[in-house]
Amino acid sequence: MTPAARVSAAIEVLDLILSGANAEVALTNWGRANRYAGSGDRGAIRDQVFAALRCRASFASLGGGLTGRGLMLGAVRASDQDVAGIFSGEGHAPPPVHHEPGRTPAGYAALDCPDWLGPKLEASLGPDFAPVMQALRSRAPVFLRVNSARMNREAAQAALLAEDIATRPVGWVNTALEVTGNARKIQTSQAYLTGLVELQDASSQAVVASLYLTPNAKVLDYCAGGGGKTLALAARGAKVWAHDAFPGRMADLPDRASRAGLRIMITQTPEETKPYDVILTDVPCSGSGSWRRDPAGKWALTPARLAELTQIQAQILDKVIPMVRHGGTLAYATCSLLTDENEAQITAFQSRHPGWTLKTQRRFSPLQGGDGFFLATLTRN
């Protein structure tokens, strides 16, 4: 496919997403309907679509409208490409540009921040607001977690390099490698297929690394989701139970644990095996710290949904505390940048439950390279 044909395809997919389709589903369906497109074409179109979603407000300003065409016209203008050469109308190229003036993005649009969230994010991030929003406009780095139960980081690097996958150590979390070359080979590599490494964001790894675990600690990962933190906890030597309100999310966790050489207990009745030394609640949240990976989520979030999420978070905290042993640890984590979901949630929890003491509280910033994350740990007095 020519560069112009790829832009036409991205316009088609973006129009589907703007009309309500899931981004991954729209891309998959486009690929199935256009089997002539090779893997390189599909990868390039995917990159263009996600770049347009990350920069939706600024590209729409530059392109003159919130449509697939407007976004891609904005993308071409933002990168100083030859507009007439791409929007030529020749072959599979988009029709020529005539009366579609753009404007310079201003205010929150210049940072691709939703208007209603701008004040909340400014208050939450302070002087880091603009740099963080700028960072979230770019593609996220690819990180791997080394399975420390099987090998050290240096050995994992060597194994990956033997398969032509280049990495570098992440200085602020000792299990993490950042992939610097051939990231698309990871999921077919032997290092990945044999459980030596897992795809996991560096900040997500840092959350687990920050938890104090005694030898053979009994741990409940209450909101396990796909199980990345579950496996990281088990690799640290903990006895881990995994639970999720939607069990289907954990469907491949037994296979991943098996290839990693780890034992995980999956439960929908965690009360039956209480008490736990540590309960990790990686709660449902706005995902604002991971908007690089889910840019559509940035624009789908509403005030009503944020209010609903904060209620769910409080309910989860209240529900799990009877399962923490006396002297044990309750860990609360989000991939959110918002104080409403982070520090304010912990303050409200302590107001409801004055017998709990805050031991640690930490934010991980996208400016460090990984996603935005928050972690607080509490113990019962």
Image (cartoon, rainbow, N blue to C red):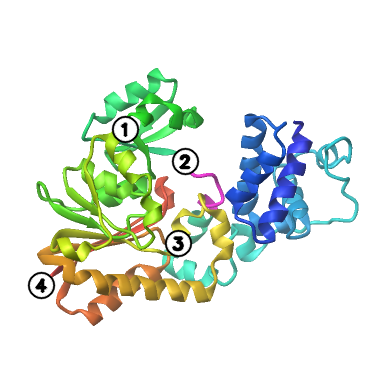
Q: Nearer the viewer, mark 2 or mark 3?
A: 2
Q: What element carries label 2?
A: loop
Image coordinates for residue 343, horizontal then vertical, percent: 33, 69
Q: Which of marks 1 and 2 is in front?
A: 1
In the image, the segment drawn in magenta is: 134-141
Task: Please state which amino acid type lies under the numbered disc 3.
Answer: Pro
Q: Name the residue under label 1.
A: 195
Q: How far apart are marks 4 and 1 (CA)?
A: 40 Å
> Is residue 104 something one can see in this rendering?
no
Image coordinates for residue 308, horizontal then vertical, percent: 44, 75
Q: Taken as a whole, is the magenta stretch helix, strand or loop?
A: loop
Q: How far apart are marks 3 and 4 (CA)?
A: 35 Å
Residue at 38% x, 50% y: name it: 226
Q: Which of marks 4 and 1 is in front?
A: 1
Residue at 12% x, 51% y: name it: 217
Q: Earlier in the sequence, mark 1 or mark 3?
A: 3
